[in-house]
Image (cartoon, rainbow, N blue to C red):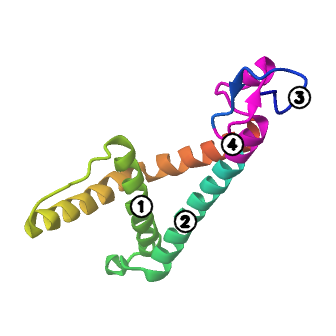
Amino acid sequence: MNCFNHPSLTAVAQCVDCGKGLCVECASAYKETICTNCVKARRRKSITAYTLLLSFYALLFILGYRWDFMAVLHGSDAQIWSGYILMSIFTGYQFVNAIAPFKMTSGDAASWNFYYIFKFILYLIVGFFTAPLTIAWNIFKLIRSIIVR
């Protein structure tokens, strides 16, 4: 097999994504043994994923803002808190599952109810404190995906 980018050179490795042959120069171009086309595809995929994720944060905030379920506070910031709380549940879900992706595999109905209520409260509490960090981290990863070759 010959290199996909340099047909006159013998391939010494294969791309881990598509299996195309790579010469010594192409195989050592990136940290991972991967061809340039697959690097570009991964980059496009990550840019799309982070853009959609940040758009989903904004959508949750807007829905919470419009829903205004914190209106019982009778303050001018109740809508902002509603948006923040709704968004923080999802960021808490992401943070908790990134740190400790534990799943319950068996139990009776009471155990399952307790498990889901506990997880929801955990997502809310953790998300309340980590939402700005989680969002900033995703913005950083989006910028890094756009800038890095």
Mark 3 or mark 4, whichever is nearer to me? 3
Whether residues under marks 1 and 3 lie with C-beta atoms below 8 angstroms apart, the answer is: no
Residue 138 position in % (x across, y down): 56, 48
Q: Which residue is mark 2?
A: 56
Considering only order in the chain, which callout, 4 or 3, is on the residue closer to the N terminus? 3
Q: Amino acid at mark 1?
A: Phe
Badge 1 is on which residue?
90
At a point 54% along the width and 44% down the height, the residue shown is 137
- Pointer 3: residues within 10 angstroms few (<14), some, or many (20+)? few
Sequence-wise first label, 1 or 3? 3
Measure how far apart labels 3 and 4 are at the Cα level. Answer: 30 Å
Q: Which mark is residue 145?
A: 4
Quarter of the figure with the C terminus: top right
Mark 1 or 4 closer to N-term? Answer: 1
The amino acid beneath tag 2 is Phe
Q: Quadrant of the N terminus?
A: top right
- Magenta residues span 17-42
Q: CA distance from mark 1 to mark 3?
A: 48 Å
Query: Do the CB atoms of the residues marked 4 and 2 lie less than 8 Å apart?
Result: no
Query: Which type of secondary structure does the marked residue at label 3 adopt?
Result: loop
| Residue identified by numbered label 3 | 7
Type of amino acid at the residue the image marks with label 3:
Pro
In the picture, measured across the screen, residue 8 lies left or right of residue 20, that is right
Does 67 appear in magenta? no
